[in-house]
Image: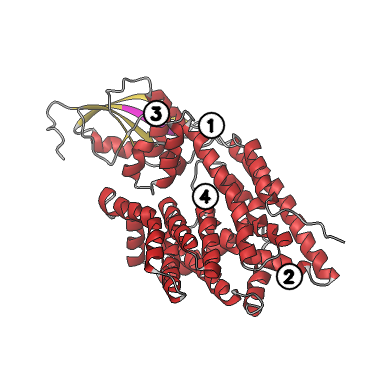
Amino acid sequence: MKQRSIPYWLPALWVLLFHLLRLHAVGFITPDGATYLRYDLLVHTQRLPLYPLLIHSLSFLGLEAELAAKLLATLGATIACVLLPLAAMEMGLEKRHAWLAALIPAVDPLFALHTLQPLTEGVFALWAAATTYALLRFRRTNATIDLFFLIFCGGLAALTRAEGLLFLPLIFWATVRFFRHGGKGRDFSLALLGLAPWLLLAAWHLLIVQRSGYLGEFEQSVAAMSPVAVLVRLLRHLYGLSNHLLIVGLLPAIAGVALLYRQRKLFLYGRVDWWLLMYLLGATWIGISIHWYYDLRFATPLMLWLSLPSAFGFWYWLRRDQLRRRLMQAVILAMVLAGVVLASSLLHEFGKLEDPYAPAAQAARAYPPTLPILSDELAMTSYHLGRKALPYSGRIPFRRSLLILHTKQSDPAMERFRLEPNYTIEEIKRIDNETGKSAAVIWRVERRPETPPFSF
């Protein structure tokens, strides 16, 4: 009797439907999201450029920037959940069990939360899954087209998030393997067309942001690295990963890693696949621990890499005795139910959040655009203002301007003490929060006649 199976694309369909139904569940814009939505802040904030460029390419077609960003993130998450099962099949997983490779990202409530906002998680998941799939295909076929997609999609991942740089050693390994297995220089020249995103990244880093931005910050993080701080962040990102896997998902993840190690000779490319996955997991884990402060968002790539060995953990226990099969079925059911409930709860709570930066920026809209506006929170103020604000860093280069100070970023009393010897300050609006405490102030600042003009 033919066994019934779940289509490998079913988790992707769930992700698509859930995202489309809850597309406007989160109205709150984070500072990172505001930066991506304001194209004119791209060079100043030195974010990697691909995601903002995609957003504003759709905006030119008539879509609102926020809607375009959410649709891109939704599309990226959906296609990633199609590519992960294909990658698992390349590793030897049966087609009827391939859907298990997309189970973890499909039920991860944090992944749903971040891909329903103007953030890079969804688009990066797409390029990361595409690069992994191309890598696994290439180690089987040694084909020029697979090498091209490996180089090209890896470059797109690096243009989206700095974690994409970890594909560079794999591209070097694939190039060496290509020639060792009979590849020809003429074919390799076609694969080199995939270097276009890497050349754009190099131009961005060297010419536009001039060795600053994310890549420059990583160089500084490596130079100032503290082993104790890195170890603490390693453990904290492990905690973050357990949140992505809903805790019970750690069981199939650990089982899958152990299975792939013990039975790496069972599959045709098992030994290669083991080292490739361990490199992706380990390099990402160490890289984010060196560079980043702790944030649940940064464990998203770790969740993606663990989804493949987790699929093998699910598969292995589902084929064992009845007790272990029932246990793994209970784990899958618990993950699905917990994922749906927690995702809905998170979206409900985030939907109630109010933006503390919006009132001050909206109040400043009443003044003519010829009056410069400075703020201690550039991205959020610019987003709500509808035009670019200027960064305030303790000095004012204009004869007359508006200054927006938020109590989260600045101490208005200290700033008044600093500015009053050289400027007259008129408070034109004070913004209070729900507790009645001051959240922001708007000052009209004018240079005193005896004060010499500011010089750069």
Q: Residue 121 carries which label?
A: 4
Q: Along the horizontal axis of the image, is 68 left or right of 223? A: right
Three-letter amino acid code of the residue under disc 2 = Tyr
Work out how far the residue at label 3 is from the one at label 1, CA to CA, in angstroms: 22 Å
Percent of width and height locating residue 397? 21, 34
The stretch in magenta equals 439-443
**Circle nearer the viewer, 4 or 3:** 4
Magenta-span inclusion, residue 260:
no
Residue under the image location 28 percent in, 48 percent down: 208
- Circle 1 packing at 10 Å, graded few (<14), some (14-19), many (20+), is few
Work out how far the residue at label 4 is from the one at label 3, CA to CA, in angstroms: 26 Å
Magenta-span inclusion, residue 441:
yes
Three-letter amino acid code of the residue under disc 1 = Glu
Judging depth in this view, the residue of 65 and 141 nearest the camera is 141
**Circle nearer the N terminus (2, 3):** 2
**Circle nearer the N terminus (3, 1):** 3
Q: Mark 2 points at which residue?
A: 316
**Circle nearer the viewer, 1 or 4:** 4
- Residue 224 in sight: no
Q: Which colour scheme is used?
A: secondary structure
Q: Do the residues labelled 2 and 4 touch (CB within 8 Å)?
A: no
Work out how far the residue at label 2 is from the one at label 4, CA to CA, in angstroms: 30 Å
Q: What element carries label 3?
A: helix
Q: Name the residue under label 1.
A: 434
**Circle nearer the N terminus (2, 1):** 2
Judging depth in this view, the residue of 286 and 432 nearest the camera is 286
Q: Mark 3 points at which residue?
A: 385
